[in-house]
Image (spheres, coloured by chain):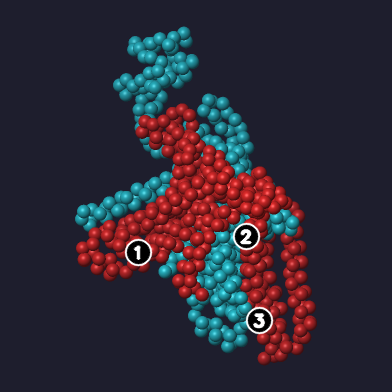
Chain colours: A cyan, B red
Amino acid sequence: MNKKNSKWMVNLVLALICLIWLIPTAGLFISSFRPASDILDTGWWTVFPHRAWVTEDQLSLDPDTDLSAPIKVNGQTYTNDQLTEGVVVDNTRLIWRNRRARLLDVQTKQWNSNANFTLENYQAVLGGKEYIITMPDGTTRTEKGSNLSRSFLNTLTVSIPATIIPLLIATFAAYAFAWLNFIGRKSIFVIVIALLVVPLQVALIPILKDYTSLGLNGTFLGIWLAHATFGLPLTTYFLFNYISQLPKDIFESAFIDGASNFTIFTKLILPLSVPALASIGIFQFLWVWNDYLVALVFLGGQPDVQVLSMRIADMVGSRGNDWHLLTSAAFVSMIMPLSVFFLLQRFFVRGLLGGSVKG
Amino acid sequence: MEALNKQETTSIPKLALISLLVFVGNLIVHSLIFIFLRDTPLNPALYAILAIIWGVFGVYSIYFTLNWVVEKYPTKIRARIQPYIFVGPAVLLLGWLLFLPTLRTFYLSLFGPNSTNFVGISNYIAVFTDRLLITALRNNLMWVVFGATACIVFGLLIAVLADRSNFEKTAKAIIFMPMAISMVAAGVIWKFIYFYQPGDEQIGLLNAIVVALGGSPQAWTSMLQPWNNLFLIIILIWMQTGFAMVLFSAALKGIPAELLEAARIDGANEFTIFFKIIIPYMMGTIISVSTTIIVFTLKIFDIIMVMTGGQYETDVVATQFYRQFFMYRNFGYGSTLAIVLLIAVIPVIILNLRQFRKQGGF
């Protein structure tokens, strides 16, 4: 294989993998804009132009036609099974529309697309708007949508402090571990590193007991503290790596100028750590925004504190086949992390690399 | 100089009183805000804004006031206590919410369902003999063996391909994107792909493909046991491969070009280069990525909760833990399962600490 050929192959294989990776999300995105009845009737890929049988005409047979005997249609005879499957004659197809009413569809193959798009799903999901679905059998039902705005707000209320609190606490701790002398420095730091890999499930039960006696269950403070703690080992470890690499001279000259540790921290460490804080902050934010287990255990299901992930998991359980609500709700929950991801991708990736690629 | 003199004039008992007042004052002020926010009915948007402001500035104010007191102490004492103000909150949180709970969970795991009667290790024996729990352990093993391996292999493959392609950045962004999606949302996405309905019109992609190829539609995540677990594992692969890829890709860029050039001049083909140079060179990264993904996979919870709720033999240790603790109220079993999860991670802790020492971390 020569070089040009192999490059071409590499591009093709990679493009194929990318396509496979994109299809699931693309399917969800397209479906979230389709009318409820369309989602239930046809696959989302039918919004793209494709060749399909389109009904041109209808034939009504004699109501007394015997379905077990050969059936005469326009001088030809077919069996019932053939008409259920569809009989193709000269590019037209005969197929039962309604067997009991002896109605036949005459169809031809044409280019067609089910490209009907609507914002109704989002209105139903965000504003709790009422909507009407036409069921496949022609009946309609009216249902109230699901108001996600409150959960969206709750998720923000959980995520912003649960990102900033551990960052601040970890930066203070990392500074002390890296540059201050105190008894027990090494042993405390080793314990922090060891806690990196403790599965959070191990801690849930005792925390829940403490929270119940302190009245922290179902409160935002409780979940901030939990998220902050679970994120702390990684954040501290990462920031320690960064802060301990800062040049020593700047601290020394600041000390000579009479700056206290706190001034050095706020005036030097925090501004200098911005790149590290940004990358690990994005990581923590995504983690908290996407969390389900911690919210499920400590926040519970009351609508006034419920977060998006819980709300959607509930919807999957209770309205598993309401695809128009599920797809748009899932997309609403993805808007924030996806925009953070695409806008700040550079910092996020750098954050990952700083933490783990070494040696 | 004047400031220094002023500090030294304050007597120690007076300072101790001020410290106590600041400490108790902090406690009272934040408790009052907490109670106000919890019990006062407010407009949701206003509530969110107030809560966020408090959460963010509250922590800073605690550090600020405590430090303010410490700086009033004579220099010698200050140098002793100040570091503890800086690490204090981190240590307190980790101790209270992560370190002690681990010990307490272990203690609970030695007791029966109501945490009253001591049962010794019989919970542990039960975990390894109860059919439901064995299924959970088996599934966890499947997740780690198939899921983690596939993530690492695909991650490496895609990193190598992307490195040689013409559209590296776009490809990496596309593969990495699912990292930003919550597992709950990913669950919805994949539920839609695996969706099954009797009849010929399939709205789930996988069944539509199967029908188009002449097959009959399947209920992928429920009926095909234990293969249904593999269909759930695919979701993890979709989400985590990007993570492995980004790290591998960075390590790949660290391989000196001269080394690869020299091998090519010596007549090595691409496969030899891959297995004899690239893989050994990246071993450190491969180990750290593998441990991260294995730990992550062992704790897997959300995907299963959303996709099957643990039915159809898809339970893993984490979902079974949730069920035992929150649904059956069997605290002993629940704790035991959490500890089993911890024991499974211990080799990884050791590996990590060793890696950390090798990097000359401390």
Q: Between residue B303 and residue B332, name the one nearer to us.
A: B332
- Residue A261, compared with residue A237, is above or below; it is below
Neighbour tally class for label 1: few under 14, some 14-19, many 20 plus, Cα within 10 Å: few
- Residue A111, compared with residue B302, is above or below; it is above
Q: What's the residue type where badge 3 is placed?
A: Arg
Residue depicted at x 59% and y 55%: B339
Q: Position of residue B34 (x, y in %)?
A: 73, 60
Neighbour tally class for label 3: few under 14, some 14-19, many 20 plus, Cα within 10 Å: some
Q: Is residue B121 left or right of residue A249?
A: right
Residue at mark 2 to residue at mark 1: CA–CA distance: 37 Å
Q: Position of residue A256 (x, y in %)?
A: 58, 88
Q: What secondary structure is marked by label 2?
A: helix
Q: Between residue B164 and residue B345, name the one nearer to us.
A: B345
**Residue B220: in sight, yes or no?**
yes
> Disc 1 or 3, which lies upstream in sequence?
3
Q: Between residue A129 and residue B35, name the one nearer to us.
A: B35
Residue B153, picture quadrant: bottom left
- Residue A174, compared with residue A125, is above or below; it is below
Q: What secondary structure is marked by label 3?
A: helix
> Disc 2 or 3, which lies upstream in sequence?
3
Q: Position of residue B148 (x, y in %)?
A: 45, 53
Instruction: Read off the chain for label 3.
Output: B
Q: What secondary structure is marked by label 1?
A: helix
Q: Quadrant of the C terminus of chain A?
A: bottom left
Neighbour tally class for label 2: few under 14, some 14-19, many 20 plus, Cα within 10 Å: many
Q: Position of residue B290 (x, y in %)?
A: 44, 58
Q: Which residue is mark 3?
A: B80
Circle on res. B102: 2
Q: Which residue is mark 1?
A: B280
2 and 3 marks on the same chain: yes
Q: What's the residue type where badge 2 is placed?
A: Thr
Residue depicted at x 67% and y 51%: B119
